[in-house]
Image (cartoon, grey):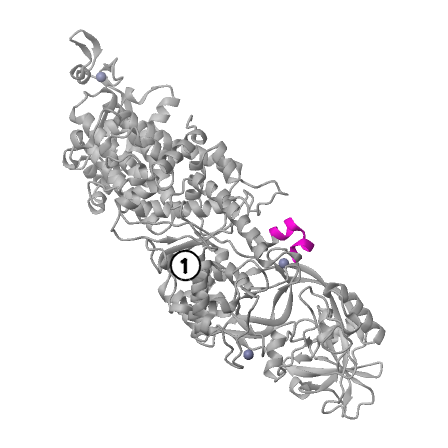
Amino acid sequence: MRAGLSKSEPKRLKDWQDNKVYEQVLKKNEGHKKFVLHDGPPYANGPIHIGHAMNKIAKDMINRYWMMQGCEVPYVPGWDCHGQPIEHKVEEKLGTEKFNQTSTAKIRELCNKFAVENIELQKAGFRRLGVLGDWDNPYLTLYHQHDAADIEVFKAMYDRGMIYRGHKPVHWCKHCHTALAEAEIEYSDETSPSVFVRFEMTSKPAGLENFDGPVDFIIWTTTPWTIPSDQAVSLKPGAAYVAVEHDGRAEVMLEDLAPKCCEEFGWEYTPVMVDGKPYVVPAETLHHIHYKQPIFDGVEGVALLADYVGVDDGTGIVHNSPGHGVDDYFACLKEGITDICMPVDDDGRFYTGEEFGAGGPFSGMDTDEANPHIIEFLRERGTLVLEKKITHSYPHCWRCKHPVLFRATDQWFVSMDKTGLREQAGKEVRENVKWYPAHAANRIGAMVEQRPDWCISRQRNWGVPIPSYTCADCGEKVMNDATLDAVIKLFHEKGSDAWFTDAPESYLGEACVCPKCGGHHLKADKDILDVWWDSGVSWKAVCEYRPELEYPADVYLEGSDQHRGWFQSSLLTSVGANGHAPYKAVVSQGFTLDGQGRKMSKSLGNVIDPNKVCDEMGADIIRLWVASVDTSSDVSIDHEILARTSDAYRRFRNTLRFLLSELEGQFEPETDGVAFAELLPLDKLMVARLTQVQAEVDDAYASYEFPRAYRALYDFVVTELSNVYLDALKDRLYCDKPGSLERRSAQTVLAELFSMLMRDLQPILSYTVDEAMAYAPAGCVDHQKYAALLNWYKSPISVDEANEFEGVLEASLELRSAVTKALEDARSAGTFTKSQQVRVKAVVPAEMYALLTGDKAVDLAEFYIVSDVELTQGEELSVAIEAAEGECCDRCWNYRTTVGEYNGHAHICKRCADAL
Ligand SMILES: [Zn+2]
Ligand SMILES: [Zn+2]
Ligand SMILES: [Zn+2]
């Protein structure tokens, strides 16, 4: 194959750009029903990878399909521009020290520049893949309009009572200095210290009043650094706890775990005996017993009951630090403990101070650094029972990959339950959105069902600010409709940069007032919105604001990780603001892996770079790969898979070439075409068959099942056309008289095949099909120059009509298999070398006989490329082969009894004589 795609595609792309093909398609379908695939914005960070390529190509296939269906298909690509990763790159470039001295306005300027440069890089990569869209006017989440939409949606949800400010533990990355959302957390294994510690009770529980020695809770934790902020211990409600006697102390643990624990501690398992029976009590007996805080003298903690306490590991008693754990926080809240202790700063270091609430002996230490010091402290005090290491699944920051901690700080949240957001979003997922594949609904449904309140504030520079103010006179937080409207207006005009440069009184006007003290000194707060909010409100900033688009969109398509990310943030903001989902359908795709199912990484050397594949093989090879794999789950790609794809490409290309070789300059469907009723029987059969395949391909595209479309087309082209039908047709094409019904009938079917393949392949092989346009009969391609402008293929007959040929097709193919077998046997026996040399005598059962001789019967000799087929009716199918009658025609190589001399042409058959 000398397709030379890597050279020809860039020229073709330039032609599309110069001649505004995307705009031409919009114009062609102007005023028709719209189809809006709303682009999920990739992050403007670094060059494109194969996952990006798969995403954008799949979108382009969908768009091109609906364009051919006659829909108006505006496609506005977008980029996600704000957020920590870009800010991190800028910090790296400047160095942390210089970064920290740089003004917010300057940092934002540098981030903006970085984003825009990367967008240009990615844009060129996406265009090269052949993706049609409004590349000159994409949407960027840093546009003023987008900034304003962020606040408009915020206001709508704030006014409905969904947004609140709370002090509770959130994931915190001490390296990135910010709170993190669920979607920004990755879990991986981490080795942590696991410690068992005595917490001595300050009063004795019922039944142990007469015990002589001290009574302890034996607690268990894997985060020793949270012990300085310990405020409680949690026990499992209803579970049985036992006291074990050791060294004159009574040690309380879960009864079921106590024997195992004692063994680990090197203790004898000797329960304290009360009235001759082991001391075993329900957790409720221990509820509200106080104990000495293990680090700070004079401070007491209290025993609580909480369902989350595990009964499989540890001692069944967990230490509780509400400032550093969500479960802990809620367990304390239930008991009325609201004075939360949180002694760790933004950098993950203990505050300096000797009192409870600061670091005490560990002041100034980093939490990781403090762990061994705390363990040592407990050991010296004699309260450490056991220390070991465990490996467990632990949350990590998605960007810097460091383990995160929980940290209670003041943050902004979207409440999932206060106004029924969770319920409404779940209802939308189940009832009003179509999911592809269908089981994706369960996945996002479960996530919405289980997720905590959405923490939407971040402590960074590069994003859209949360529009709140603090009164400089009394410290009140100020946010109301008047201030929000002023901010929306400001952002529409000047963008969110203005938040950091303009004084509030300069744009708030009348709204610049503290409702509590009446003061007029409002200070703009510093938190920014979660970047998922930015992309999440694109239904507003893009679909609603851009006149060519529509909200809700017809479809969103992204990787399955977006169930946690963009699919969800879009859903929550749209349901939150307007009560319904932003999309009618969602297609989710798997990840791209290497040929052995491994993640791609530079260190493994298994990265497939789409830019490089375009330069070496051509974009159409990547496009064909995307169509051929089941993207509803994870897909594989490597050089071997691409080589196989390249083989498949060759089959499609050669078929188009063959069809063109019999049509170009020789046939125009409008003047030379034969009506279906007049076609030769074999040709009618083929039209029937292509009609069936077309229906399958159509259905597959409409259901976003690209591999089904690909499979139907590949099997049809390779197994049926190349191996069977096109071969059989060559005799008529090469030897019959030009203009004869026989030849025109054959060409009519080739033209139908060509027209169909051009449409069916256009979404996949966009460059190649466009290349074929130049050689195509005008009537086969709607008199268009560019393939993107084609209308969908329409067969001359209906699927029902086509299905009437099913019986004769099956019978003909069944007999063909038997004939092929007999021919192979004859060939290996050396009896004949070519199929034209034989005549076939076949015995066929009655039903088959009726079909093969009925009104839809085809010329079997032509179909099987033999000299004659003689059918007789019998019990069982059998095939015999004998030598053809007559002689071999020098022109057509068929064996005919009519071979002789005609008009000076020696040794040709009568048909050839007529043709000549
Ligand atoms: Zn981080
Ligand atoms: Zn005030
Ligand atoms: Zn002949």
Residue 811 at what x, y percent from top left? 26, 38
Instruction: Answer whether residue 857 is magenta in the image.
Output: no
Magenta stretch secondary structure, dominant: helix
Q: Quadrant of the C terminus?
A: top left
Residue 98 highlighted magenta (yes or no): yes
Q: Quadrant of ligand 3?
A: top left
Q: Can residue 405 be seen in this view?
A: yes
Q: Which amino acid does label 1 sit on?
A: Ala
Q: Give the range drawn in magenta.
A: 89-100
Residue at 68% in and 83% down: 303
Q: Which residue is drawn at 32% across and 27% down?
A: 658
In the image, what residue occupies the spot 46% across and 60% down?
147
Instruction: Out of 569 and 450, give the one closest to the viewer.
Output: 569
51 or 176, nearer to the observer:
176
Above or below: residue 376 compared with residue 626 = below
Q: How crowded is mark 1: few (under 14 residues within 10 Å), some or many (20 or more)?
A: many
Picture quarter with the N terminus: top left
In this picture, residue 582 sits left or right of residue 884: right
The location of residue 591, given as percent across then percent down, is: 51, 50
Q: Percent from the top left, x then y, of residue 348? A: 69, 65
Q: In this view, does 270 lie to the left or right of 448?
A: right
Quarter holding residue 713: top left
Pointer 1: what residue?
Answer: 541
Q: Does the residue labelled 1 lie within 8 Å of ligand 1?
A: no
Q: In the structure shown, which secondary structural element does the residue marked by tag 1 occupy?
A: helix
- Using the rendered image of the protein, determine whether residue 719 is visible from the camera's viewpoint: no
Decide which of 191, 345 is in the foreground and name it.
345
Looking at the image, residue 387 sits to the left or right of residue 306; the answer is right
* In the displayed structure image, the side of residue 133 where residue 183 appears, left or right: right
Task: Return the x and y of residue 252 as percentages of the image width and height.
Answer: 74, 81
**Quarter of the view holding residue 901:** top left
